[in-house]
Image: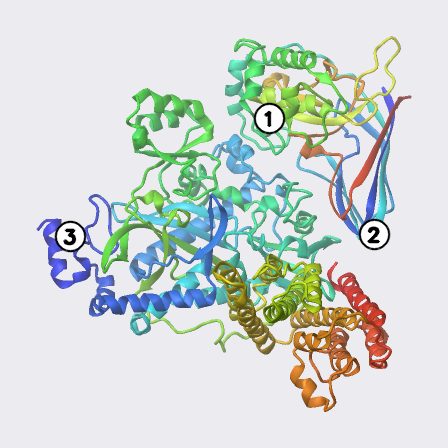
Amino acid sequence: MLYDVALEITYEYASPANAGRHALRLMPATIVGEQRLIHGQVHLVPGPSERLDRSDFFRNAVTDVAYRKSHSELSFRLNARIDRTAVPEAFDVSPSLSGMARELSSIQSLRPDEPVHFLAASPRLTLDPAFAVYAEEWIHPTMSALTAVETIGKALNADMSFDADATTVDTPVLEAFERRHGVCQDFSHIMIACLRSVGIPAGYVSGFLRTIPPEGQPRLEGADAMHAWVRAWCGIDVGWIEYDPTNAVRVGQDHIVVARGRDYGDVAPVKGVLRTAGPQTTDHKVDVIPR
Amino acid sequence: MNLEEKVKTGDRRYGLLKSYQPFPGVSDELLDPNGDVRPVWRPFLDHLSKLTAEEIENRFARGNQYLNDAGVYFRQYGQDGAHEREWPLSHIPVIISEDDWQVIAEGLTQRAELLEQVVADLYGDNHLVADGYLPASLIAQSPEWQRPLVGVRPKSGHFLHFLAFEIGRGPDGTWWVLSDRAQAPSGAGFALENRVATGRVFNEFFAKAHVQRLASFFRRFRDHLVELQGESDSRVSILTPGPMNDTYFEHAYIARYLGFMLLEGEDLTVENGRLMVRTVAGVRPVSVLWRRLDSAWADPVELNETSHIGTPGLVEAVREGSLTMINALGSGILETRALPAFLPRISQHLLGERLKLPNVATWWCGEAATRNYVKEHAETMMYSPALSTALPFTSAQTDFIGRDFSKFHKGILESWIDSRNEKLVAQEAVTLSTTPAYQDGELHPRPMSVRVFLARTTNGWEVMSGGFARIGRTDDASAIAMQSGGSAADVWIVGGNRPEKESLLHQTESPFFKAQPGALPSRAADNLFWLGRYVERAEGAVRLQRAYHARLMETADPDAPLVAMIGDYLDQIGVAPEEAIPDGLISMLESAVISASKVRDRFSVDGWLALNDLLQTAKGARRGMREHTDVPHAMGLLLRKITGFSGLVHENMYRFTGWRFLSIGRAMERAQRMSDLLSVFTAKDAPEGSLELLLEVGDSAMSMSRRYAVSLSQATVLDLLAMDTKNPRSVLYQLTEMKEHISILPGATEHGHLSELARSVLQIHTSLAIASPKTLTPEALSDLRDSIAFLTVELTDAYIR
């Protein structure tokens, strides 16, 4: 499926910022067998004093920009065309939960894709016992890892309500979990914390959802902004699978991957530091149109 | 002969050892296993025995006085927050023989080489993990393994340049490595201060005792840093987390000692992949940064995003290869508590050698076989979080000894070990050797560990001949941390070749030491400017408060017109006149101390002490003041202390740019305050006595009677306090000062044009110079005040923002 993606993120500062440095993770990824970036540009207004494109530890594309001139507005625009292939659903040959530890300990590598990076607490995710208590209600040691992922994902989706106004990007995960509400970021973080707590390595994926669903299908939550979902490692044979807890679906052709990491902090679309005194307002628009 | 009898023999020879009773099964630095004083200690003990208790106390007091005068302090964290406390020096040095030291030095040099290879592998090819020498999950789960640095080769070719090792002596007399410090090791500066203080305590003895000197170590490390900088106009700097850090004193001390700039994260910026320091002369490159800041906090864009003390883009500068970090970002991974479990095998693998100096036996509980071993020996172990990077014995919350669990049912400890699994590390619960500490006229054995410092120099790793010993308060080794009441001692390496006397200040043989290009960081300029302002502001408030209370005592009527007017004026500047020592005044002094604390590397210890003394005097007076009739007296005292401080600073400070900012701050405050006072107290309805008040507050009564034979008039007061070019209290005099300072600041003239700031100050100066007492109406004076106030904005725009 071919998509044209347009994203615009704008900031307005009450008092002009006289310097700033940002790391942008906006460009969709190319993933062999799943997704191909045909073309894409990140456009910035005003133009930055410096710009550098690189990739990070997890192989995500990063654009570093620095501003040294005073500015009161800033906009980042992405235009990209992506070819997204359907991910074939594999047979469930994943090990049982009790067998995961053995497979994990056989891994002798720190390559970015290895599950060892995705099992412990990460900067934005502490593994409060509450997550384990919740997750263990739904699983048992003989359950396969893949079934456990889908079971926990469905349970969370049923127990939590989507509420765009309840949380912000900085709301602690535990707080969103206790109140059982939030947006895709909260759904994903909570699911990741639950999976890690029962020994399933899990990471965070940022990306886009097609804006208008195929005919006859409901519109998915999260299509009007950047979206987020979960990837989970289900043993050496199955490897990584992706699951969208906000919509309780396995990730397929409607999802476009931008960046992958341990939690939101690793993939935040715009990360950075400003030298400014006053408050700021921000706006965020997305269009994902199938061609 | 058994141990007890031997100690009795010692008793006869040395009265000091009357109660010196080493613990069974623990080795002692002073006494050998037979209870004889070790040869390396004998000369020192002979010397100490000749002194009376009183003489010893006097000598100790001399050492303390030195530390006090040098401003050495230690920040302690308690329940009521952090406060500075006196440096806890244990005056008896730890004496180690050159032969022993040689073994330590060789062992630690080998370990430094090994750690360099380990960290290079962890941020490089990862063979150690691939080949099974290190578990992947241990590294991947550590918050100290900084993913953004993976694959980044250090510019200098080396990750590690400065290391510290905490070592202790075990019961069998051999030395053990207790902990590796590779992140941003502290203590080397304190070791120097301990040395100076202890050297003063035992001055005649020290001079003849053949103790190895420390200064050459620092000199060669400094030379190494300067070499790394290359042939450029760039700088070597020290990065500190700031004055709230517990070892900030040491950062400032080392910066002063080595002549490097002391910077905070906000002083720095990254431009096109180069690290730059913001100075009053614009941005300037920094090519070597000795960080005293943990990696995670160094860059909020790529590392810990919540850091407010980092520099955005620092990692990029490292990646671009324009910056050498001492040590490389990410080196904190080497401090991981579980790592020593793997080092013996890694040493065989990488170096083909056994560890020359063993580390404390360590077991990572993430593997079943190891865990079983630990469970079998559960009571002899100390347990800590596997990923902890804290020093052993420093955190009672996380470290505990298995034997303390023995009172519980046996199974509890085992099942706990199983449940903690890979999160747990067990270490042999070592007993540290004891060394003498002086207490109540006698020596007592106390547990100790020694911190040894290694620096990379042109000739490879060099070990500092000495170190920093931590001495326990009681016989409990776990109370060895200074936070829990332990103390610090100097370490003397004795024997071998006669040491050459050298210090950093007296060196002739260093051909390539070049002075750092001088440029004042903007933040330092800002703090110096405000220091000048606050001190002057406090002086003004003190003078007014004194005038108020003197008049109140005369009239005993707070509603008398002049008294009431001064009272209102004081209120407006935030000083409540009815309080004897107003809070507003205290907070001005506190602000001055805060500003000064941020630039301690830039002005003298005497100045710092005088300023603190000033604040303490004011606070003391507030507590001790009984009657308001004391106020004029107290204010007089404060005034003398303020002038004392100003005198110290202005007489002794080198005329660098920093001094100019301090002076501009003072001049600006004084000119602004005086023009304001004049505009208020020369108003038409100003009460009788206003002119005398102005003269008094302007400290110009004497100048008045000398200059003007005629009687007091508004015109003569204005002439003297606004326009006189020779009276340092006059507005014009201060404007002249400012004009001169500003004309010398960087960028004051660009391409033959005056900067905006220089133009403004010239304009104000000129218009006042051509004024006359007649044209200086209250309105004109308040305009003058406003235009002086605006200079602060222009100064900030030009140099500080």
Tag count: 3
In 3D space, how far apart are the residues under numbered discs 1 and 3 (Cα atoms)? 58 Å
Name the residue tied to disc 2: A70
Label 1 neighbourhood size at 10 Å, few (<14), some (14-19), many (20+)? many
Residue B537 appears left or right of B745: left
Which residue sits at x=49%, y=76%? B509
In the rendering, at what x and y percent does residue B108 appear?
Answer: 40, 52
Question: Going by the picture, which residue comes out furthest to the bottom?
Answer: B709
In the rendering, at what x and y percent does residue A279 appear?
Answer: 78, 42
Residues marked 3 and 2, same chain: no
Residue B658 appears left or right of B136: right
Q: Amino acid at mark 1?
A: Pro
* Res. B364 visible in picture: yes
Labelled pair 3, 2 in contact (Cβ < 8 Å): no
Res B565 quadrant in image: bottom right
Q: Which tag is nearer the camera, tag 3 or tag 2?
A: 2
In the displayed structure, B405 sits above or below B50; it is above
- Indicate the chain on which mark 1 is placed: A
Residue B281 is marked as: none
Name the residue tied to disc 3: B34
- Kindly state the secondary structure of the residue where label 3 is placed: loop
Q: Which tag is nearer the camera, tag 1 or tag 3?
A: 3
In the rendering, at what x and y percent does residue B129 appear?
Answer: 52, 34
Q: Amino acid at mark 2?
A: Ser
